Amino acid sequence: MLKVSGYKNQFSMQVQEPWFSFIGEPDIRKRKTVEGRVGPISKHIELVGKEGRIYSDDRHLYAKVKFIRHYDTLEDYLQAEGWMNAAPHAISYMDALEKYSQVTTVNLNNGKSNVGNVNTAGNTGNTGNIGNVEDRIQVFGPIRIRTEGGINAIHLELVSPIINNEKSNIKTNVGNVNTVGNVGNVGTVSTVGNAGSVSTITTTTTNIPSASPPKTSRISFSNEMIKK
């Protein structure tokens, strides 16, 4: 039976869709019970017996690592563990092999920035060329598996159902500005009170020959991303 509270967060692991949804599948017969991770067994062995958070872009769940097995190749991994346990959305062993080969991630070892460089020309006004597009590699490609030291089969026991991430309710108090007449600017500023009511303050300024447009600031929030 899945718990409804009191989850332990002893590790964190990101899983791409649709793989994540199959880890959280309520029906054990359709559930992904084995998660593949590239690397030597020493990289993940400390997770055994721990309960942690597995997440995608906007959802998460909690699972416990029961045990880990190590393989030299993707083929050995799928054959020994059972392709239906590692890729339950596949229809055959060959299809599972294909689905694993389609998983990609950003190449962090290419010595290049993931943001393209922009080169601008001189005084001629010509626009320069945009640099390299983000470089991606196969997560379970044979070369990467061999270079990284194999592939680990992490056996998971589902502890919680899939949980939707909470959305932020933070609002920015940037008011609308309406221009009236040739020189008179009428500004409207809206603020949100503690009780949820909206109050409006209107100020009028006249005889301003040259008014600069209001400046607004943008606040960005980001979540931790750990790729396969």
Image (spheres, rainbow, N blue to C red):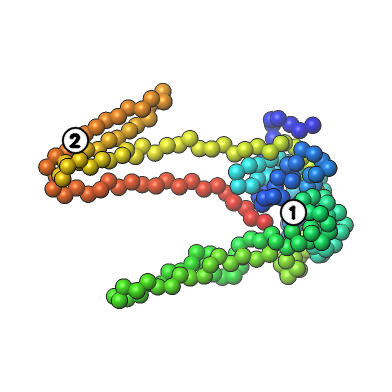
Give x and y (percent) for residue 97: 78, 61
Quadrant assignment, res 138: bottom right
Q: Which amino acid does label 1 sit on?
A: His
Nearer to us in this view, 65 or 24:
24
Which mark's residue is nearer the viewer, 1 or 2?
2
Is 8 on the left-hand or right-hand side of 202? Answer: right
Quadrant assignment, res 104: bottom right
Give x and y (percent) for residue 33: 80, 47
At x 55%, y 47%, the residue is 223
Quadrant assignment, res 82: bottom right
Nearer to us in this view, 148 or 35:
35
Is 192 on the left-hand or right-hand side of 166? Answer: left
Q: Is mark 1 on a helix, strand or loop?
A: loop
Disc 1 designates what residue? 44
At x 87%, y 59%, the residue is 79
Q: Distance between the residues labelled 1 and 2?
A: 64 Å
Badge 2: how crowded within 10 Å, few (<14), some, or many (20+)?
A: few
Q: Is residue 127 visible?
A: yes
Q: Can residue 77 be seen in this view?
A: no
Disc 2 designates what residue? 204
Is 4 on the left-hand or right-hand side of 180? Answer: right
Q: Which mark is residue 136?
A: none
| Quadrant holding the C terminus | bottom right
At x 73%, y 63%, the residue is 101
At x 69%, y 30%, the residue is 5
Give x and y (percent) for residue 227: 64, 55
Q: Which of marks 1 and 2 is nearer the N terminus?
A: 1
Nearer to us in this view, 226 or 133:
133
